[in-house]
Image (cartoon, rainbow, N blue to C red):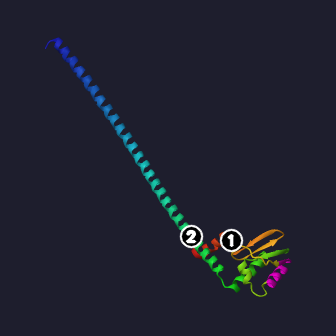
């Protein structure tokens, strides 16, 4: 082999060695980049998976909460409906109670609302016709106990039941319906305690 062939062979061997070294370095760098990319991908996948699991858990929690709220709302509506029915039935019973019990109840009501002034008491035409004997004297007695006086009006008012007290142009509606309406919240609370607690 001539000197030129040796030089060519040596240059080719050096070039091959340099190329092999560069190729080996490139493969090593490529594997390093690939390993980093795989690690990043695994990290990102884990993060996405955790985030998805958290979102799913949050969504489930919101659904359970929403269902519970709907259930409680329906139960509350049902309870309010039952309470309203009980109050309506109680009002119906009061409207149809026997005369002596009805007029005794009105006297108790008068005892609560009579004022120590001069006034007038009004009943419905139907109640005026069926007032028990001596009832006007009982009304006067209750008014006197309160330090006032009441005159029984002989003119019937357009009311269903109960009475209206008038003191100096100011009227107090003491009909059973007005009493029920005024005490509806309080009565509802009492019925709720009796039925549901």
CA gap, disc 2 and disc 1: 17 Å
Q: Secondary structure at mark 2?
A: helix
Does residue 114 appear in this view? no
Relative horizontal placement of residue 156, taking residue 82 as reference (left or right): right
- Name which quarter of the figure residue 5 lies in: top left
Does residue 110 appear in this view? yes
Q: Indicate whether 174 appears above or below 3.
A: below
Q: Among all residues in the image, which is located at the extreme left? A: 1
Given residues 118 and 133, the one toward you in this image is 133
- Residue beneath disc 2: 81
Which residues, given as a range, are shown in magenta? 136-150
Q: Residue at x 19, y 17 (%)?
A: 9
Q: Quadrant of the C terminus?
A: bottom right
Tell me residue 144's x, y (percent).
85, 80
- Residue beneath disc 1: 183
- Name which quarter of the figure residue 4 lies in: top left
């Amino acid at each position: 082999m001539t000197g030129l062939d040796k030089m060519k062979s040596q240059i080719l061997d050096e070039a091959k060695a340099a190329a092999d070294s560069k190729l080996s370095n490139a493969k090593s760098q490529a594997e390093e980049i690939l390993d980093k990319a795989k690690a990043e991908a695994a990290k990102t996948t884990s993060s996405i998976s955790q985030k998805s699991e958290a979102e799913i858990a949050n969504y489930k929690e919101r659904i359970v909460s929403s269902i519970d709220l709907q259930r409680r709302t329906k139960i509350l509506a049902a309870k309010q409906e039952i309470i309203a029915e009980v109050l309506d039935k109680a009002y119906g019973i009061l409207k149809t109670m026997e005369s002596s019990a009805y007029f005794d109840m009105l006297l108790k009501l008068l005892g609560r609302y009579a004022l120590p002034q001069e006034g007038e008491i009004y009943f419905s035409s139907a109640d005026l016709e069926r007032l028990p004997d001596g009832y006007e004297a009982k009304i006067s007695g209750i008014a006197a106990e309160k330090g006032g006086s009441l005159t029984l009006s002989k003119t019937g008012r357009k009311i269903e039941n109960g009475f209206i007290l008038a003191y100096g142009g100011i009227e107090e509606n003491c009909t059973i319906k007005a009493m029920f309406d005024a005490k509806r919240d309080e009565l509802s609370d009492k019925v709720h305690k009796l039925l549901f607690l």
